[in-house]
Image (cartoon, rainbow, N blue to C red):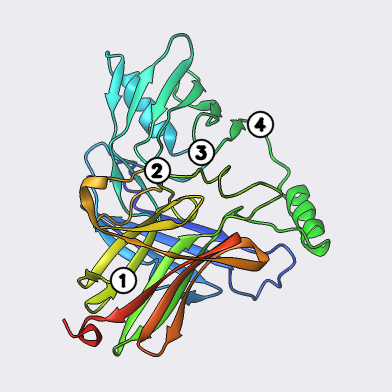
């Protein structure tokens, strides 16, 4: 932290409890804030993930960082409210790893309860706070996270590690429920990549239930799914200039539509149709056997690649080709 109490560097590390001490973390996010720029380097098993690593401008005046399901950093926003004499305070918030600032506010709700609306969520959270601004409990049940957090005087970390190690040995997944992955391909001597969250079925009905028909779907989990190309390409016949975009889909009982959107880096609930670059139909095939965890791939084809989204019993796909290969 700086002398003024501002967070200037944050490192979040995920390790398998059963891994040797010398093994690199399975996931490490290192974010540094300098003036109005935040730089995040993401490493997976010790190797830098260039698709997820980025540098972005963020506001610093009054802004606070946030880490999902954490409360310590939110207390900075609560203290801004308590130090004011108004009922609501706007507090710009940025998320490490996403590297984007979101409009947010903290509002008094009576007694020891405050409402926190973070711009990367579509619904507010509610916290019970102490006189010094400390968060005693936090309810995120109205958001897509669906968590309840309660402050405890002491946490037995050794017991938690032992429990995770036992879960790993029994074959249970430990870590983020919907971790992120990156699909990559080479096209016309340049790199394409798709960065996305990977939800699992976990016994749930998917299309037509968890993923409603005829509605825009983030095509993944958590932060919006991102597509990057270094060269001009066609995706499903639509021209896509070099750059980074977000991908969304509209599944229907009979087919699916892929949306290529000019905005990138936002949370998966922040879709802005005004920024659509193109909408293209997708080919729909049956996935057999059913795919338990959502998988996006860029599979080589004679004239380019095929972007495929596979989950449950559905396989949605569109062709991707270099712009020159289309003759346009």
Q: What separation in Å lies between label 1 and label 2 (alpha carbons)? A: 23 Å
Q: First in sequence, mark 4 or 2: give its number.
A: 4
Residue 158, image x and y in percent?
A: 75, 51
Q: Which residue is mark 4?
A: 153
Q: What separation in Å lies between label 1 and label 4 (alpha carbons)? A: 54 Å
Q: First in sequence, mark 3 or 4: give its number.
A: 3
Q: First in sequence, mark 1 or 4: give its number.
A: 4
Q: Is residue 35 above or below residue 245?
A: above
Label 4 crowding class (10 Å Cα cut-off): few <14, some 14-19, many 20+?
few
* Residue beneath the point at 53% across and 39% down: 145
Q: Are marks 1 and 4 in contact (CB under 8 Å)?
A: no
Q: Which residue is mark 2?
A: 269
Q: Are marks 3 and 2 in contact (CB under 8 Å)?
A: yes
Task: Name the element at disc 2.
Answer: loop
Which of the two marks, 1 or 4, is nearer to us in this view?
A: 1
Task: Name the element at disc 4.
Answer: loop
Q: Which residue is mark 1?
A: 235
Q: What separation in Å lies between label 3 and label 2 (alpha carbons)? A: 9 Å
Q: Which residue is mark 3?
A: 144
Q: Are marks 1 and 3 in contact (CB under 8 Å)?
A: no
Residue 240, image x and y in percent?
A: 23, 69
């Amino acid at each position: 932290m700086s002398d003024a109490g501002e967070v200037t560097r944050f490192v979040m590390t995920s390790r398998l409890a059963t891994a040797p001490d010398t093994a690199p973390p399975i996931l490490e996010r290192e974010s540094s804030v300098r003036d109005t720029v935040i730089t995040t380097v993401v490493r997976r098993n010790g190797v830098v993930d260039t698709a997820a690593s980025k540098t972005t401008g963020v506001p610093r005046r009054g802004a606070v960082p946030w880490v999902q399901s954490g409360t310590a950093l939110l207390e900075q926003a609560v203290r801004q409210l308590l130090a004011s004499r108004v009922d609501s305070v706007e507090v710009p918030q940025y998320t490490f790893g996403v590297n984007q600032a979101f409009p947010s506010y903290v509002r008094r709700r009576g007694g020891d309860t405050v409402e926190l609306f973070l711009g990367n969520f579509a619904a507010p959270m509610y916290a019970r706070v102490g006189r010094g601004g400390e968060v005693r409990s936090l309810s995120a049940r109205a958001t897509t996270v669906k968590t309840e957090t309660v402050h405890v005087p002491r946490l037995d970390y050794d017991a938690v590690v032992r429990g995770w190690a036992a879960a790993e040995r029994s074959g249970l997944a430990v870590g983020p429920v919907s971790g992120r992955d990156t699909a990559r391909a080479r096209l016309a001597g340049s790199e394409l990549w798709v960065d996305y969250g990977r939800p699992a079925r976990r016994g749930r009905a998917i299309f037509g239930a968890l993923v409603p028909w005829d509605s825009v779907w983030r095509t993944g989990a958590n932060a919006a799914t991102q597509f990057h190309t270094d060269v001009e390409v066609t995706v499903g016949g639509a021209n896509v200039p070099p750059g980074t975009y977000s991908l969304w889909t509209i599944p229907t009982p009979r087919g699916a539509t892929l949306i290529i959107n000019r905005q990138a880096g936002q949370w998966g609930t922040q879709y802005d149709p005004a920024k659509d670059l193109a909408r293209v139909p997708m080919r729909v095939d049956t996935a057999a056997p059913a795919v338990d965890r959502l998988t996006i791939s860029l599979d080589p084809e004679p004239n380019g690649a095929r972007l495929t989204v596979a989950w449950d019993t559905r396989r949605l796909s569109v062709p991707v080709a270099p712009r020159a290969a289309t003759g346009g």
